[in-house]
Structure formats: structure tokens, C-alpha cells
Image (tube, rainbow, N blue to C red):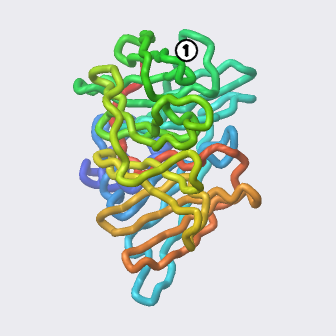
Amino acid sequence: MTMLFDLSQDLVEEILSRVPITSLGAVRSTCKSWNLLSKNRILCNAKPRNQFLGFMMMGYNRLSSMRFNLHGILNEDMEEFFDPSIKEIGNLLNQGEIIYKVLYCDGLLLLCVNKKRDTRLLVWNPYLGQTRWIQPKITMTTTCIYALGYDNNQNHKILRVFDNQGYYEIYDFKYNSWRAFDVIPNWEIDLCRGGASVNGNTYFWTQERMEGYDSFQTPYFLICFDFTAERFGQVLPLPFQHHDDDENTGILSFVKEEKLSVLYQCMHSSFNKTCDGFFIDEDKKVVVVFDLDEQEDYINAYIIGENICLKKVDLGEVRTLYCPIVCSSSYVPSLVKIKE
């Protein structure tokens, strides 16, 4: 009888490549050699070109993986191929802990977790199954802005900006420590909109600092935080005019973590959904827009193909007011080790 350790390495790699990333931990526990092999090489890249893998917030303490097939989403007869698989991820949080923000960069997820006004950060590598709790240097507030990135030496860091008060901190994974910085900007970051990580740096929505009603008429720009220089760059113009006093909205995303993308939504257009996130698949020429229906507590996915055909898919009930979509581009596994 053939045993697990008798299988050829090529066959083992093929088997592991077909295992969902969030299920690799259970598979690793069956065989030491499989565990070693999968933790030193990325073995699940055989399918990503045909599948999207992302993460969603389905509740205040419920993080789920979302996987669906992108190959031939629409066939010639316009039949729907979109069949999402949503699986809740367990064993990340303790009793009574609430997730209020999740960020993504370079195969890592950063969870902002709150319990009785005590907030901590949890970094998670889904591929390696590793987690790392980080205790802030100062008491945290939910109105802080966070970003996860890395410098030119692939050292990962966390940025924390305090309520646009000219003070920010950086946590360095390599040294397991926080450092504080003071900056007096003439701009302020939009606290209600998430950033997007591209090539290790993070882009935010920002406006010129104004007082009173004038702030509503100030146009939005983008600003980039450089994790190598550990500072903010110059403001960057958007390809469209956008103000606080108009009814239109804009959302940041990325394509393959290499290019920045922006969704500009006109509220008076025929597609008048409140978008909570989106992703673009350039190879398949498909855009998927996610909409959280706050009245019905359901999240829907709208798939737009090259022929502008629109398909709606119900992804299920959610119990959170926060943006539920975490990865706005298909998740790419990482060998970054985050254990202290």
C-alpha cells in the first residue's frame, strides 16, 4: 500500500497546489515532509490565474475567505459561471474580540482588533498559517489610520496616523518596536476611506487642510506614504475632479499589487449602487464591484464583462457596517515569516 511519504515530490506538489490556501494548515499536520515543503515554497500558484481568492468581513468577529472561478464567467449564451465559495475562518480571535478594520499587503493581512476599549493588531499570513500579535505603544483609537507596507529591503512595517493631528508611528517587524514622528502637513487624510498598497507603499485620499464650509469644496488628491523613506510624498492629482460636496464617490484599489486603480461612481448614473470595493482582472477583462445593502444586510457582487453585460450575485448576509471586502485583487501567497 502506498503511503504519504512514498509519493513523488511532483505528485505532492500537484496535490498541495489544489488545496485551498485557508485549508493548508490542516493538510500540513498530516505529514512532516509536506509541512516542510509547503512552508519553503509557494505550491498553490497552479490555479490562481483561473480563480479569485479574497477575504470578506461577514460580521464584527467573522472573517471569511471568498473563492470563485474567473475562467469563462460569461459564456456565449450569457449563462452565469460565477459560483462563489465562502468559508468562515476560525481560531483567529478570542471570545469577545471584534474586528473593526482589515488591511492587506504582500500576502499578509493586518487585523485591527478591539476588546473592551483595548485594541491590538494581529498580523496573519494565511499561506504559512502564522500570526503575530502587536501591542501598541500608546492607547489606540478607532479613528486612527493604518497601513501595512514594506521597504526596499523587504522589511515589513505598519503605519499608524493619529486623527490627522500631525503625529504618526511606525512599527518595524524586524526590530519589534514602534518609532514616533511629527509632521505638520497642509493636508489631511480622509478617515472614512481606505488606502491601497502598491509595491509596498500605500496611497490615501487627501484634501488640502481648510476650515469651515470651504473644506467641502476642496478637491480630493492622492498622497503616498513611502515605507523606505518613512515619509509622505507630494500630493498627486486624480484623473477627475471630486469634492466633498458632490454626490459622487471614489474608491481606491490595485491590480496585482503593481498598479493603482480608482473607481469613480456617479450617483446619477444607471448603476447607482453604494460600492464598498472592487477588483479588476486584466487578463479576463472583468470588473467585479461589491455592494453592501445596508437595508437588507446583504452583500452583492456585480460582474461586468468586456461586453458591458452586468450580472448580480448574492454573497450572503453580513453583520457589520464596515467595508467587508479586504483583498481587492486576487490573493497572492507569501513566504514572509511574521513570527517574532
Residue 128 percent coordinates (x, y): 41, 35
- Dot 1 corresponds to which residue? 136
The image shows residue 305 at horizontal and vertical percentages of: 41, 74
In the depicted view, which residue is nearer to us: 48 or 140? 140
Q: What is the count of numbered marks?
A: 1
**Could you say which is closer to the camera, residue 329 or residue 179?**
179
Q: Nearer the viewer, residue 142 or 315?
A: 142
Res 74 quadrant in image: bottom left
Q: Is residue 156 left or right of residue 130?
A: left
The residue drawn where x is 37% and y is 52% is 261
Which residue is at a point 33% across and 68% down the rendered structure image? 284
Neighbours of disc 1 within 10 Å: few (<14), some (14-19), many (20+):
some
The answer to whether one can see residue 39 in this image is no
Vertical placement of residue 32 versus 276, above or below: above
Along the viewing direction, whichever of 312 and 93 lies nearer the viewer: 312
Q: Amino acid at mark 1?
A: Pro
